[in-house]
Image (cartoon, rainbow, N blue to C red):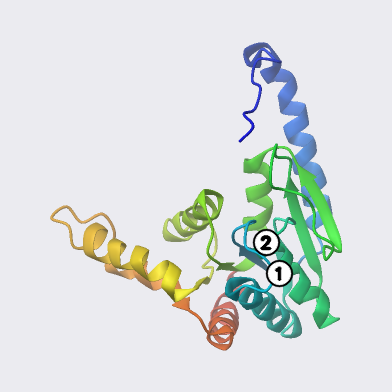
Amino acid sequence: MKSADYTKEDFRSMDPWRLFRIMAEFVEGFEHMSEIEKGVSIFGSARIKEGTKYYQLAREVANSLSLAGFEIITGGGPGIMEAANRGAFESGVGRTVGLNIDLPFEQSGNAYVQHGINFRYFFVRKVMFLKYSCAVVVMPGGFGTMDEFFEILTLVQTQKVPPTPIVLMGEDFWNGMIDWVREVMLNNDDIMISSEDLDLVRVTDDPHVAIEHIEREYGKTRLKR
């Protein structure tokens, strides 16, 4: 893996000027995303290939969500992101959005993004995902996917964002983690979470269950947004 070169800039002297670049990304992102009304962010690995189980599952759920009137937002890259944008594109009615990130590896845009924007900063990009999403679908993935999942889960748990349905798709992938959360974080002598926190997440392999859950929870909360 190629390592980023952090020696090119003196970060301490550049920080005041970096604020302008950060503000520009926020302004561009807000302008670009302002028309999104019913966004669903779909997260997952960039490394999952076409023809595999999870690629097809992401494609199917995105297609069905688009037909149900939702707009699909992804990271704009390959793998699960491509599958989700592709499913939305193939619906013929849904808007497909890609929020790409500049990386030294892996991340290149996919052909199914209709409305794309590039980001330099992860934290600005995550604000765009969360601000314009009324629901989140998380497919199997790596560290980046886990970061996105636990960030939205924390924000919902602490009520920093409106109630947002979170669906984990891929029972074989997620059930071990959910079991660990239940057995260790919840049942530890020093309880780390509340039992109600587990209700914030729905785990399923069935796209119909995922969409019914999202539509039901969105219907309960849309007036609060």
Which of the two residues, 29 or 149, is positioned nearer the viewer here? 149
Label 1 to label 2: alpha-carbon separation: 6 Å
Picture quadrant where residue 25 is located: top right
Q: Residue at x 37, y 71 (%)?
A: 175
Label 1 neighbour load within 10 Å: few <14, some 14-19, many 20+: many
Please, is residue 157 above or below residue 170 in the view? above
The reply to whether the C-beta atoms of the residues labelled 1 and 2 are less than 8 Å apart is yes
Q: Callout 2, which amino acid?
A: Gly
Closer to us: 158 or 128:
128
Which one is in front, 62 or 140? 140
Q: Residue at x 63, y 65 (%)?
A: 42
| Residue found at x 82% / y 62% | 113
Q: Quadrant of the N terminus?
A: top right
Instruction: Report x, y in % for residue 52.
Output: 62, 72
Frontmost residue, 47 versus 121: 47
Amino acid type of the residue that numbered disc 1 sits on in the rendered structure = Ala
Q: Quadrant of residue 3?
A: top right
Asked if 218 appears above or below 101 in the picture, the reply is: below
- Residue at 85% x, 60% y is 115
Q: Which residue is mark 2?
A: 79
Is residue 194 at all visible to an observer of this figure?
A: no
Q: Position of residue 26 (x, y in %)?
A: 74, 42
Q: Position of residue 91 (x, y in %)?
A: 80, 82
Q: Does residue 119 lie above or below 56 as drawn?
A: above
**Residue 215 coordinates in the image, percent (x, y):** 60, 83
Figure disc tally: 2
Quickly name the residue at label 1: 83
Count neighbours of disc 2 (C-alpha within 10 A) and say few if under 14, some if 14 to 19, many if 20 or more: many
* Disc number for residue 119: none
Mark 2 lies on a secondary structure that is: loop
Q: Looking at the figure, which quarter contains the C terminus?
A: bottom right
